[in-house]
Image (cartoon, rainbow, N blue to C red):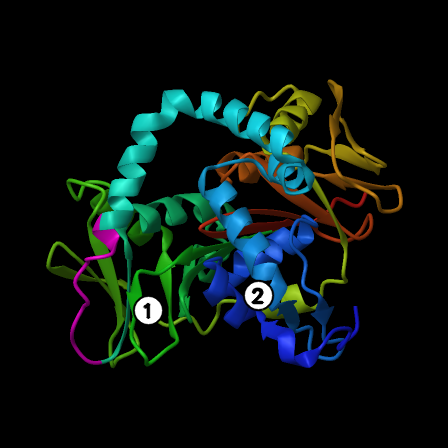
Amino acid sequence: MKLFAVGVDHLLTIGSFAGRCGLSPSALRFYDECELLSPVAVDDLTGYRYYDTSQVGAAILVRRLRSAEMPVREVRRFMTAGTDERRRLLEAHARRLDQRAETLRQALEQLRVDLVQPTPEGPGQWCAISAAVLAAGFDQVRFAADRTGRRPELAGILVEAREGSLRLVATDSYRLAIRDLVLHDQSAAMPLRGFVPLDTADELSSVLNNTGNNTDEVTLRQRHDGFLEATVDSRAVTIGGKDERFPDYEQVLLGLPSGRGGLTDRRALSRALKESTGTNGKPGATDRMARIDFQSGALVVRGETGESSIEVSWDGPELSVAVNPDFLAEALDLMVGSDVVVDVTGPLQPVTLRSADAGTFTVLTMPIRS
């Protein structure tokens, strides 16, 4: 779409629109890729997205449905359904949630506690985030860090705090994992940035997972010497240093051609990849290969020991890409939610996986030249 296709007075930037409807900008980008909630205009020169004020009601409804953990595919059906069909969809979803009622009540209680968390004090750059969320984030991206010892500059996790979010990045040059987490609070002096070695990240995760309850916060602070410091339970420890040798991963993202995104079931794709080589989720060799054929409405996964076909909302041209199935399956098992967007542009371009909850998780895996 070209700017401007609608009245300028009614346009909102993605940030303003996110503030009105209570969705993060990263979640809005994800819903655009899913063709669930798209901007009315996109600036061809800058890529900036613009929404109309009339979309606020629909966005709030999407937010409420997703807060109730309704899968994207069902939200899509709900948005176009009549009253009776909407009632049926809600009742069916409620039945599935009955067994998880206690977990959801605990999550709501956590949100109430979050509203009254004290604001950290002191000079410098800092941000505050749930201890449990940060520990889970480290656990999600660490698989992509270099564990061979050959690339010490990649044997850890890059930490970046930006406006409203904390980004964790890991790569071994074959894979790139990016997790964006929602912050509780932050200082005006941003950004905050540092590199956390894997052993330090593991030690910090252990501390965060044993804080006693799920309401504890961790404060990350950039000291004047450039080092990162984490404060948990009033204890401050140095967790990371400067990151001059970490590659410019954003240039990798900017250099990717615009691809097609297909929405599919995350767990079904993981099973298909494992069955294609008969690994059943065991750590695999780096030379394993499976081929993924993108067809209209289906992903076909072929490997040495099996072939599987799963449903996908793919309407792009048919193409085939060879990948390490263990790499993709490992990423899928660490992702959040029931849905994943698979993005690919050609047989020699990276395969991108995206999922979203209160933030986003993106993994790029390099293809295999078969």
Circle on res. 249 = 2
Q: Residue 128 placed where, x, y %?
A: 27, 62
Q: Is residue 96 left or right of residue 269?
A: left
The total of numbered circles placed on residues is 2
Magenta residues (range): 113-123
Q: Is residue 214 magenta?
A: no
Which quarter of the figure has residue 267?
A: top right
Residue at the far left in the pictured view: 234
Q: Which residue is mark 1?
A: 241
Q: CA distance from mark 1 to mark 2?
A: 18 Å
Can you see residue 285? no
Residue type beneath disc 1: Gly
Identity of the residue drawn at 75% across and 44% down:
368
Whether 265 is drawn above or below 146: the answer is above
Q: Main secondary structure of the magenta part?
A: loop
Q: Who comes first in sequence, dot 1 or dot 2?
A: 1
Nearer mark to the viewer, of 1 and 2: 2
Q: Secondary structure at mark 1?
A: loop
Q: Closer to the camera, 283 or 30?
A: 30
Q: Closer to the camera, 356 or 104?
A: 104
Identity of the residue drawn at 71% across and 49% down:
343
